[in-house]
Image: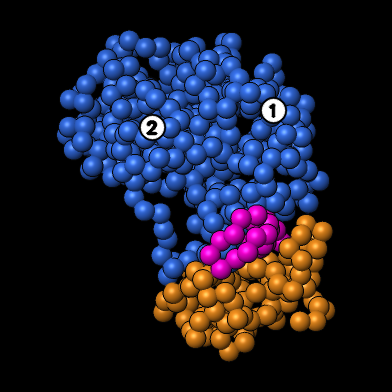
Chain colours: A orange, B blue
Amino acid sequence: MADPRRPVPEPTPETAHFWEGTRAGELRLQRCAACATTYFPPRPFCPACSSRDVEVVVASGRATLYSYVIHHRDAPGFTAPYAIAVVELAEGPRMMSNIVDCPQTPEALELDMELEVTFDPLTDEITLPLFRPVGVAR
Amino acid sequence: MTPNTVAIVGAAETTEMGRIPDAAQIQLHADAALNALADAGLTAADIDGIATAGESPTNLAHYLGIVPTWVDGTAVGGCSFMLHVRHAAAAINEGLASTILITHGESGRSRVGTGRWGMSMASLNGQFELPYGPMGPPTLFTIPWLRYAKTYGATSEDLANVAVIQREWAGRNPRASFRDPLTVDEVLEARMIAWPFTKLLCCLVTDGGGALVLTSADRARDFPRPLVYVLGTGESVETPMVSQMEDFTTSRAFRVAGSRAFAEAGITHADVDHVMIYDAFAHLPIFGLEDLGFVGRGEAPAFIRERRTAIGGDLPLNTNGGGLSYMHSGMYGMYALQESVRQLRGTAPAQVEGAEISVAHGVGGMFAASGTVVLSNRAP
């Protein structure tokens, strides 16, 4: 269970499928039927070609560590030091997240390391997609 | 715009700078505005166009007693004032206003008379960035750096060189917040904020303001101060979410704004005598030098290490000390413009001898927006 003091996302009609997905243990992206672009964050049209003909797809959950900083001050719901990371999903889009089951150190957090999604409930409605190194036992 | 058709005829900062606990934010706008009007030999009654960010232009017009026929409230963060210069030049050329006042004031440190910070948790930033623990710009603006560093083999020493050299410039500026010399080791051993960024790789938080008065070049010849002409301008935006930048090693908004400004001005990089690149954090001059095209991708750290941007170098950069050492109220772009004007008037504390063309390049948000202004003191 994620620390309940974290800021809690407020879904909108355009993002509801994403948060329903994480609650169901799925990382849901969107794909354009016209140009085949897979994209994030959610919106009901393609940001590459403006087509409204888009569908929700379930991502593999595989990602690599693209970039990050390690914050050295506590924040609501976080105890320093903790990394604020951007991961690159196997399907292409990037998203901000946290890296769990891993020391929050420059030595342990190597750019391009292989990650997999894990789902962490924050409230009854919201489950956050976090990432952990591939092959690490929980 | 057509180069040399519009000029800056008034420019000034707030009377005080740094910690100003006895002034509300709108009074910082007004103090800077009154100083800039006096610099131009004008009063508010002479102004018919107004642009500002951080306060509504309505608040400002009422507070100063201005009756505008042209209003611009473009607010895209710290570079908003570069965009205001661009929009004002177009408005003057189109006859929408003849004499335009652009103001900035921010009680960034004392927080007197400021609005609340905050972003809706229903916004895309609220849903897809804030739950992961960022606490403002030091933890967001800095995220792209590690990817840049891995791509080009850059190091934390490269970041520290930016802070050290700008402190050398600040040492020549009596109004700079920090003037004592720094070493690379001191920068790297300072308190860690968001690894690998220490406190001395992050900008100051201060109070202050600045204002500009623009008019047509034809009218400008009647004004008392040395003229600074607008040669070219550019603007763009990319994304409100740093996590969604196209490429973490280069800013698309920087490239679009910069290339447009250089093209409009009809200049090459070799023509530029002085440059200001908004430095909220130490990696921004590195991105700026590359994205504006002064050096190739990955070459800025060596360019800075070789002291090309330092005192005595061939491309003096951030000669007021920058956001890292001079001041940073929150929307620093106005101070970059003020230093470019001082350099072209020949009144800068760390004057670049013979400077004729200056580039002021700003950023808004976390690489979210950008504005570039090319200025010159050469008569058309």
Asked whether, in this view, residue B112 is left or right of residue A129, the answer is left
Outermost residue toward the bottom?
A24
Q: Left or right of A102: which side holds B236? A: left
Q: Is residue A33 above or below residue B313?
A: below
Inspect the image, locate mark 2, and give the three-letter code of the amino acid beneath it.
Ile
Secondary structure at badge 2 equals loop
Q: In this view, does B146 lie above or below A36?
A: above
Number of the label disc, if any, that sits on residue B30: none
- Magenta-drawn stretch contains A77: yes
Chain assignment, label 2: B
Place residue B54 in its image quadrant: top left
Of residues B306 and B264, the one nearer the viewer is: B306
Comes first in the chain, label 1 or label 2:
2
Q: Quick check: B289 left or right of A114? A: left
- Specify start and end residues of the magenta stretch as a single range: A66-85
Q: Can the viewer see residue B258 in this picture?
A: no
Where residue B20 is drawn, which disc sits there? 2
Separation of disc 1 and disc 2 at Cα?
Answer: 26 Å
Q: Quadrant of the N terminus of chain A?
A: bottom right
Identify the residue under disc 1: B182
Residues B14 and B249: in front is B14
Question: Residue B78 placed where, x, y %?
Answer: 46, 41
Question: How far across and how far down the image is residue B144, in percent?
Answer: 66, 52
Q: What residue type is labelled 1?
A: Leu
